[in-house]
Amino acid sequence: MLSFVLTAAAVLPLAVRRAFPLAVLIACLPSLIALMALHFAVGTTVLGVEVAFYTVTAWDTRRNARWGVLVVLVCIGVTALLGPVDLSAEGIAVNGAVLIGGRILGTGTRERRERHAVEIRAAQARAQAEQDRAARATAEERLRITRELHDVLGHALSVMVVQAGAARHLMDNQPAKAREAVTAIAETGRFSLGQR
């Protein structure tokens, strides 16, 4: 029964290995070491450590990945001292190869993920730059249209002011010409409104 409990304690932390990779690796080791110290069969319990080691290498920070290597080396040293009953020289070689393979695969996974993150950030930066260019072009076009509108309206208002002055001057002596000037003011105003 104790062997079963220790085996479960050595592998159950794997359920949260992506959230806390280094902590899970460290949590798997005491039960594994206890199995060896009590001379129980280790069996596949060592796979929990190997999976946790891969996870630290692939998904944790580079600093924690280095700590993971140190933790595994200490565990290997303790294993050599305790001499588990079911670990042969071939088993040591296989488990060592699995750990080394986990380190290689984990490092490759980390590098691909980091490269992908850099590519995504670069694509986002390019997209943002394109949006900024489009926003600047839109603002410049609006400014150009505003200037043109200002010029058209300014010219129309100037014409209207001149015609209004002339109409006021002509109103008493030449009412027909004053009406023409007022009509021209109205037409200029309508034309300017149509140019908006």
Image (cartoon, grey):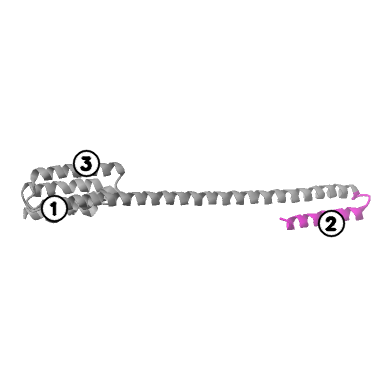
Looking at the rendered structure, the secondary structure element under dot 2 is: helix
| Left or right of 92 in this view: 184 | right
Majority SS type along the magenta span: helix
Q: Amino acid at mark 1?
A: Gly
Residue at image mark 2: 183
Residue at 74% in and 58% down: 194
Q: Which mark is residue 91?
A: 1
Residue at x 26%, y 42% (from the top left corner):
66
Residue 177: say if magenta: yes
Could you tell me how far apart the alpha carbons at marks 1 and 3 are, in whole angstroms? 21 Å
* Foreground disc of the pair 2, 3: 3
User: Dot 1, crowdedness within 10 Å: few (<14), some or many (≥20)?
Assistant: few
Q: State the CA–CA distance, disc 2 to disc 3.
A: 95 Å
Judge left or right: residue 191 versus residue 54. right
- Identified at 63% across, 49% down, the residue is 140
Residue 193 falls in which quadrant of the image? bottom right
From the viewer's side, name the closer residue of 38 and 69. Answer: 69
Q: What is the three-letter code of the residue carrying label 2?
A: Thr
Q: Quadrant of the N terminus?
A: bottom left
- Closer mark to the observer between disc 1 and disc 3: 1
User: What x and y, as percent, mark residue 160?
Assistant: 81, 50
Give, as a three-letter code, the residue at label 3. Leu
Q: Secondary structure at mark 3?
A: helix
Where does label 3 land, which residue?
Answer: 70
Mark carried by residue 179: none
Q: Which residues are magenta?
A: 170-196
Give the CA distance from mark 2 to mark 1.
106 Å
